[in-house]
Amino acid sequence: MLLISSLLAFSVAFVLQQPAVPAPVVPAADLIVGQAPLSYRWQGNWLRLPPEMKLGNTHGGIAVDAAGRVYVNTDTENAVLVFEPDGKFVKAWGKDFRGGAHGMLIHGAAGAQSMILAHTSRHEVVGTTLDGEVQWTLGWPKESGSYSSAAEYAPTAVALAPDGRLFVADGYGKSWVHVYDKDRRYLKSFGGPGSEPGQFQTPHGLLLDTDHTPARLIVADRENHRLQIFDLEGKLIEVIARDLRRPCGLTRHGDVFAVADLAGRVTLFDKDFKLLAQLCDQPDESLRAQNGVAPERFKVGEFVSPHAVRFDAAGNLYVMDWVSTGRVTKLERLR
């Protein structure tokens, strides 16, 4: 009995002294989010900057050109950063646009594309080449009668209709959407501050949905926690006020819409705005919609403050978190 008791005591002591075996960790490169047929591989370290360059505050938009190059806004003197689809750095420009480059739209035929950029602190919309050469500027909409000075106007997003009409969202100003003709002459304004259907509290993002017939304008009405859909004359068609927290902007690929939700997730809807999935939801409410979250608190598979989202032609999804040190994630579409 004494021998058996001694052996049992030794066995227990041996087990207690062994280091705990950690739970298996899924490598970041192998993390899959979503579910088939909408599943994606998380690529958090997708973009590759030169060693001497830091990303800086990612507060703006994302655009993709006909060649698949990805354009990202920051608040630094590199207001527009350009990357190949694999994340290789191409170029940066925009010293004169530092601190306020917010929403980008690339338009035109392949080989002859240009950009329209909304700038919050310059209180204007700017047309540029894809290398940043200014072609035209559009100032504050004094014709609307809603402003006493340019300082009250802080545009956050632009959209372009097939007939050349330009829509500008004054997301950080007085919450109007302004409409211009193809020659950038003022036509009208709609919306204005409020919570009633057709009104806005921070119309932060725009999408001209030409995949729908007839084309329509979708507004991310952020602080009303909803999307609003209008015809191109500014008549309200539908309000989407479900499954959203603080929608900042949206993008479409085929029959799928993706919405960047500042409060920590990306939401996927079908073409009728029925919920498909919510990706990479931030479980810690104290980290949602926070600009100052330190990089060591970033986790693979979790967003913090999704501010912009963009599909490329292949259905890959690029997501910008609004964080002071910068974060842009690629979700690679799996087939």
Image (cartoon, rainbow, N blue to C red):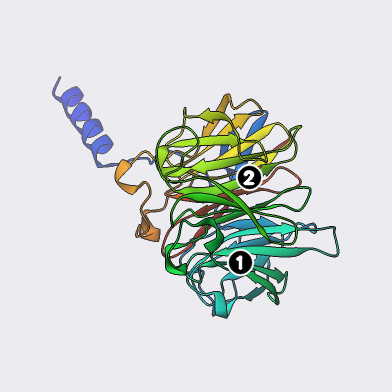
Q: Is residue 139 depicted above or below 30 in this figure? A: below
Residue 24 coordinates in the image, percent (x, y): 46, 39
Q: Is residue 116 left or right of residue 139?
A: right
- In this rendering, the label closer to the viewer, 2 or 1: 2
Q: Quadrant of the N terminus?
A: top left
Residue 315 coordinates in the image, percent (x, y): 71, 42
Residue 145 coordinates in the image, percent (x, y): 49, 57
Q: Is residue 149 left or right of residue 90?
A: left
Which label number is shown at residue 149?
A: none
Q: Is residue 158 depicted above or below 75 in this figure? A: above
Q: Would you name the residue on which mark 2 appears? A: 207
Point 69% across, 72% down: residue: 136
How far separated are the C-alphas under marks 2 and 1?
28 Å
Q: Earlier in the sequence, mark 2 or mark 1?
A: 1
Residue at the far left in the pictured view: 2
Which label number is shown at residue 48?
A: 1
- Camera-side residue of 183 and 81: 183
**Which amino acid type is marked by label 2?**
Leu
**Which amino acid type is marked by label 1?**
Arg
